[in-house]
Amino acid sequence: MLELAILGLLKERPMHGYDIRRSLREDFGVLSNLSFGSLYPALARLETAQAVRAAEPAPPLGRGRHLADEVPLTGSLTGERAAFVARRATAKAAAALGGRSTRARKVYEITPCGEELFEELLESADGQGGDPRGFSLRLAFARHLSPQARIRLLERRRGELAERLQRGEHSLARRTRPVDEYEQSIAEHAQETVANDLSWVERLLARERTALASPVGDASVSKRAARRAAAAAAGNRGGGLPAGAGAGIAQDARQRP
């Protein structure tokens, strides 16, 4: 789960360890107690798997030179803009941390291998029996999923909640000892919470299916499929994950809270 969160943040922009920890603690409730003792080993694992790397510090700009001059021209406005934003974020982070320790100055960025691993972790089923923390984290990054993958994510969660609701009903009906009104109210409140979560997921599912059925949704699916095909072709030419590297990280991430 931690590796997924790190890759999701670095997918947005390069960041150093302090920024990553602050964002994870402030923006993701499931990781509010994250310590540097957990963060840096996870970054080291991702770096070993070539999923992240240390961003090269931007060289000082000479007189008459601008950051835009350092961005390679690719012919794609979207690609050049993304490269410019990433280069500017890296330069700002490196400049802000110039007087700190070596670890603090290290700015991390996601690699093509990390992009593939992020998608694998994001689309994988939670291996911890429907842990709500894993679902919340995946939903936070659901904008990076295809509409079909978002629907699969929500359908899995709906099934987990429906099963929990059914188990709770059976438990209430098969009490082996008498309970007072306070115990009963706690059990009923737990059931109401699960039922409310189930209703919320069903509303999200209905919205996703409506969007997918619209012409705009069909067009976005086609564009995403074309981008993935291009990325897969590039990976086959030598830019893909190193053999076994991503699989090990993915398996560890699914087993680690």
Image (spheres, rainbow, N blue to C red):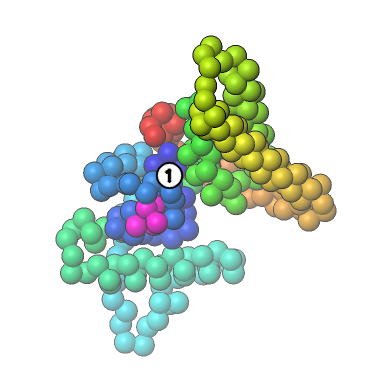
Quick one: which residue is furthest to the top in this view? 176
Residue tagged 1:
30
* For residue 67, above or below residue 241: below
Q: Which residue occupies 43% across, 49% down?
A: 29
How many numbered circles are shown?
1
Q: Is residue 229 visible?
A: no
Q: Nearer the viewer, residue 120 or 254?
A: 254
Left or right of residue 2, residue 175 in this image: right
Q: Which residue occupies 71% across, 45% down?
A: 203
Query: Which quarter of the figure has residue 49?
Result: top left
**Quadrant location, the N terminus:** top left
Q: Is residue 161 visible?
A: yes
Left or right of residue 60, residue 111 in this image: right
What amino acid is at disc 1? Val
- Assign the magenta stretch its main secondary structure: helix
Left or right of residue 136, residue 3 in this image: left
Q: Which residue occupies 54% across, 29% down?
A: 181
Q: Residues within 10 Å of mark 1 (few under 14, many from 20)?
A: some
Residue 248 placed where, x, y %?
39, 30
**Quadrant location, the C terminus:** top left
Q: Nearer the viewer, residue 39 or 79?
A: 39
* For residue 44, above or below residue 174: below
Q: Nearer the viewer, residue 1 or 145?
A: 1
Residue 110 placed where, x, y %?
41, 51
Q: Nearer the viewer, residue 257 or 55?
A: 257
Q: Which residues are magenta?
A: 22-26
Query: Which quarter of the figure has residue 64?
Result: bottom left
Residue 4 placed where, x, y %?
44, 43
Quick one: which residue is furthest to the front in this view? 180
Q: Which residue occupies 50% across, 44% down?
A: 137
Residue 219 placed where, x, y %?
77, 53
